[in-house]
Image (spheres, rainbow, N blue to C red):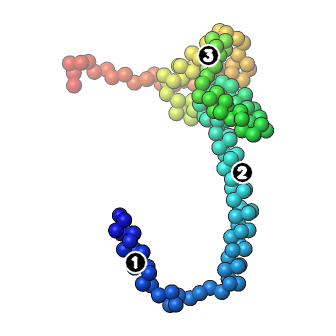
Amino acid sequence: MKANLTLLGVLLSFIPSSGFAHASTETVDKIADWLAIFVISVVPVACVVILLLIHVLPEKIAERRHHPQKEAIQMLCFLSLVFGGLLWPIAWLWTYFKPLGYRMAYGTDKHDDFFFEAVHRARLGTLPSDELGYILGELDSIAARRILPPELRRARDELEALQSNAPPPAHNSKGAGEA
């Protein structure tokens, strides 16, 4: 590797410099001015945009994972911007850890949006029947611990109606000896 660099240096030293066109100082000054304007105006804006995109990552992850306290994580991300990013690691950790007593207290560890998304998927027919049964069980578990809000009650009723209209799952009727 060192020999290759030495050979490159020797070859570059034989290139005559008088054969190349030299730019005038005015052209170099214009290029330097435009480069300075670009660096002064675009780079700080790009840095702020990147900082904001990174700063809302815990909020987006909590939303995607249906974290039950995603609104609180969103507020913590906002407060972290106000306090110079000091609270951001806490929001990041909170995103990946669900509260210990939440399921015992509320009957589920999912945000209400999870159930609304399930209703939407069931309407489209993309929700498997076993997952539909699981979601109905979750809603029953919530109802056993607290009164279901009207939106969740409507979602549960719609899921139950969709489950009763769904065809039964296909089972393999062949025995072990048949093939």
Q: In which quarter of the image is residue 120?
A: top right
Badge 2 marks a residue whose secondary structure is: helix
Q: Inspect the image, locate mark 2, and give the three-letter code of the amino acid beneath it.
A: Val
Q: Inspect the image, locate mark 3, and give the three-letter code of the amino acid beneath it.
A: Leu
Q: Residue 10 carries which label?
A: 1
Q: Give the residue at mark 3.
A: 100
Number of other residues with Cα within 10 Å of mark 1, as a class: few under 14, some 14 to 19, many 20 or more: few
Instruction: Look at 70% across and 84% down and name the residue there.
Output: 26
- The reply to whether callout 1 and callout 2 are in contact (CB within 8 Å) is no
Q: Which mark is residue 48?
A: 2
Label whose residue precedes the other's in the sequence (1 or 3): 1
Which x, y percent locates residue 109?
Answer: 61, 20
Which x, y percent locates residue 80?
Answer: 74, 36
For the residues labelled 1 and 3, the Cα–Cα distance comes to: 68 Å
Which x, y percent locates residue 92?
Answer: 63, 33
Residue 98 seen? yes
- The reply to whether callout 3 and callout 2 are in contact (CB within 8 Å) is no
